Amino acid sequence: MIQGTGSNVGKSMLVAGLCRAARRRGLSVAPFKPQNMSNNAAVTTDGGEIGRAQALQALACGLEPHTDMNPILLKPETDTGAQVVVQGRLRTTVRAREYSRLKPTLMPAVLESFHRLGTAHDLIIVEGAGSPAEVNLRDGDIANMGFAVAANVPVVLAGDIDRGGVIAQMIGTRAVLSREDEAMVAGFLINKFRGDPSLFDEGYALIQKRSGWQGFGVLPWFADAWKLPAEDALDIASAPHTGACHVVCLCLSRIANFDDLDPLAQEPGLTLTMLRAGEPIPGDADLVILPGSKSTRGDLAFLRAQGWDIDLAAHVRRGGHVLGICGGYQMLGQRVRDPQGIEGPAGETPGLGLLDVVTVMEPEKRLTRVRAEHLASGQRFDGYEIHIGQTDGPDCARPFARIDGVDEGAINGTGRVMGSYLHGLFRNDGFRSAFLFGLGVANAGLRYDAEVEATMDALADHIETHLDVPGLLAVAR
């Protein structure tokens, strides 16, 4: 199990790289994360949802994503409340204080999924969440040491040297762990080192001496990490391309399933801007994307608070294109109605009025993989739906796509404002090329899935070069 000295120390990437390294050694390996908190979900083969990071790790293992790989998924709806998804299905919605009471009751489902994976594979590589140093959360813990102890899984602690203070992170974590938890730690590794790793030799030796833990190496910064699907939406903005076509994505407060954007970050013919709160939509934008949201009406209010509604109207008047995906599609309509209070207080919120459609929230969640046809280009593509709500109106007579003979999505009369419930469409090279050609972007020949696979292999090579992989595998039991 890879646990971290804090959030965003690179646990997800480490697990993915180790999974690929183990697979290349002929092992049947699977990823596992007891509890994840993310609105960036993947639809699984068994019709559920898990964190997007575990889907990437499954890819590293050569497996289809399965709900057992992430049995507890928390999907924040507000600053203090979240949906609780158990083994791929929505169980309940709770506030943070309520979850602390619910959490211990979820351990049986966590262990059931873990042991089911264990019977099917030679090796399970587990990812922790946050940090075991958060000992105030230890009671009832299912994400870090609570799980490790219950399942008897040895732990390797990862520290992020890029943030500074990694010696204190390591030794401080050891200092606050109980004896039982500290006994689960088999060693440590250092992640995200920039420059000459030998400059940290003394610090590395000090951690070994003060902690008594075995060191498994110092991993230099992996420069191509941006080519892999991002777990945090703002990580996508690190893409280096500065092409002539400018695509702007609005970073909503409850942005969800933003994996739609990862392939665009790799297209050399465009510049992708992840627009943060308080920043105006640039006047040179060619396409503005309204992404998915975990709280459509709440993010409509957030969007208006940034003045983006005014900017969008000006963008459309200038002849710019707009694409709304899932919750973003719902926002583009005339109204969003939630009579049952599914996403918050019952009521109705005016939409942006850029599409002549109306959305009504309904309790039944649509969660499925699909094969669709983009009607404007004739390109067929794979995608998935993960949403509540039904959208209808006159602009649906101009559908965006068709699935098994059924029209999907809507386009306004100008053809420049489009909405669709389909996620993952830009992963398809043919569709992406055809769609971007309509914006004046020439086909650069990017094969997105192949690029992800090559980057995964490069990550495994990087880990094999700098970490003691045989030692890490020897820890497993």
Image: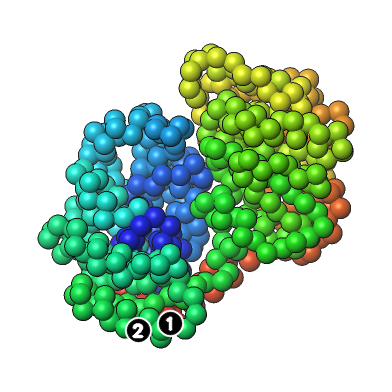
Look at the picture and state if 156 lies above or below 264: below
Residue 396 in picture, x, y percent from top left: 76, 25
On the question of residue 172 being in view, the answer is: yes
Are there few (<14), some (14-19), or many (20+) residues within 10 Å of tag 2? few
Look at the picture and state if 186 lies above or below 138: below
Q: Secondary structure at mark 1?
A: helix
Report whether 466 appears left or right of 226: left
Name the residue located 19 percent from the left edge and 44 percent from the top edge. Answer: 139
Q: Residue 86, labelled with which disc?
A: none
Per the model, the C-alpha gap separating discs 1 and 2 is 7 Å
Task: Give the tally of numbered discs.
Answer: 2
Are there few (<14), some (14-19), or many (20+) residues within 10 Å of tag 1? some
Report whether 477 appears left or right of 245: left
Q: Secondary structure at mark 2?
A: helix
The residue at which mark 2 appears reads as 201
Q: Quadrant of residue 468?
A: bottom left
* Image quadrant in which the C terminus is located: bottom left
Q: Residues at badges 1 and 2 in contact (C-beta under 8 Å)?
A: yes
The residue at which mark 1 appears reads as 197
Q: Amino acid at mark 2?
A: Asp
Name the residue located 61 percent from the left edge and 45 percent from the top edge. Answer: 276
Q: Amino acid at mark 1?
A: Pro
Residue 443 in picture, x, y percent from top left: 81, 60
Residue 187 in picture, x, y percent from top left: 26, 72
On the question of residue 384 being in view, the answer is: no
Residue 437 in picture, x, y percent from top left: 84, 52
* Image quadrant in which the N terminus is located: bottom left
Pick out the residue farthest to the left. Answer: 179
Report whether 301 appears left or right of 158: right
